[in-house]
Amino acid sequence: MFQLHTGHYRNPAQLPDGDVLVVGAGPSGQQIAEEIALAGRRVVLSVGRHRTLPRRYQVRDTHWWMDRMGSFERTVDTWPIPRPVRNAPAFVLAGGCRNLDLRRLVANGVIPTGRLTGLTGPTAWFADDLAASAAAADANLHAFRASVDDFVARTGMIAGLPDDPPAPLGSWLETAPRRVPLDRMGIRSVIWATGYRRDYSWIHAPVFDATGEPVQRRGVTAADGLYFLGLRWMQRRASDTIHGVGADAAHLAEHIGHTTLGWSTEGGLWSTFVDHPEVRSQRRSCAVGVVA
């Protein structure tokens, strides 16, 4: 059996002849499953937790709405949601203007099933949870649409007419296979779309909690000179994104300038910090570590 993680996947041509099992229905899993199906292969998609969003709603891109509604700037202090929610899967989105969800995949020939629970020889076993996973993803979709509608109503913003609601999920939820004989179905490849786990084994400092995540406050840890950037929900919802990490970086720059270099940072901006003569002269001598 040919096996591949999504980090090494490039296109269907690199797979041996035969059909494919994709494990994981996050953004990469769904995008890859669709691409392989459109290339003429039969694809079984093992579906676990995932979150669905429309690519566009009321004419605008989803991220445009989230930015306008202030979703990216919500902080851990103003939105004290529990850790399991903060660690929720990434939103399933695709490029361009098209939506990507299980409905579209089924229309393109993908066979969705529940979460992979085990392998016995050439047989794959799946949980009876496809309907629950799909319903939870759809609930996220409907909640987002409702939040945009409410925002438009409250602000008086001129926007496009609300899009038609998505079609019902369909009878395929009830026919999802629990057992798939990979050999008899002609499945020759497994693609693991199971994401990544952060590896901090190279950091030898007592700054991690029981789950292995760093204990920090806006990037500052209990270990002198050790800081973090780019963590999910580090301070803001956008802390782990390119457009959101800057605010956290500016805060750390001011903190380091004050605590390590001993000079006032009142009104200090990132550019002021970087261009300060004392900073330029001490960049190479300061024992400061920032993990991003």
Image (cartoon, rainbow, N blue to C red):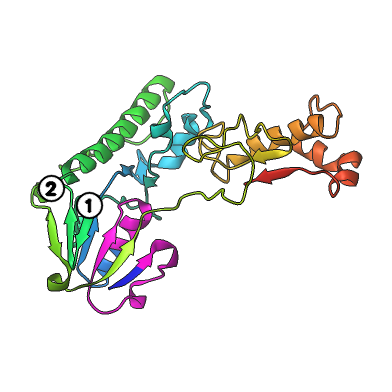
Q: Given the image, on which type of amino acid does mark 1 rest?
A: Thr
Which portion, as a residue range, is magenta? 4-33
Q: Which residue does the image show at 77% across and 34% down from the upper left?
A: 256
Instruction: Establish if 118 lies above or below 241.
Output: below
Residue 201 visible in image: yes
Q: Is residue 77 magenta?
A: no
Counting residues from the start of the chain, the first of labels 2 and 1 encountered is: 1
Residue 162 appearing in the image: no
In the image: residue 118, left or right of residue 283: left
The 10 Å Cα crowd at callout 1, few under 14, some 14 to 19, many 20 or more, is few
Q: Position of residue 270 (x, y in %)?
A: 75, 37
> How far from the left and from the top, in percent, is residue 2?
31, 73
Q: Amino acid at mark 2?
A: Leu
Residue under numbered circle 1:
117
Left or right of 266? Residue 234 is left
Residues packed near mark 2 inside 10 Å, few (<14), some (14 to 19) or many (20 plus): some
In the picture of the structure, the residue carrying the numbered disc 2 is 173
The x, y position of residue 16, in whole percent, is 29, 78
| 3 in relation to 246, above or below | below
Relative side of 282 to 213, left or right: right
Residue shown at the point (79%, 44%) measured from the top left: 287
| Residue depth check, mark 2 versus mark 1: number of the one nearer the observer | 1
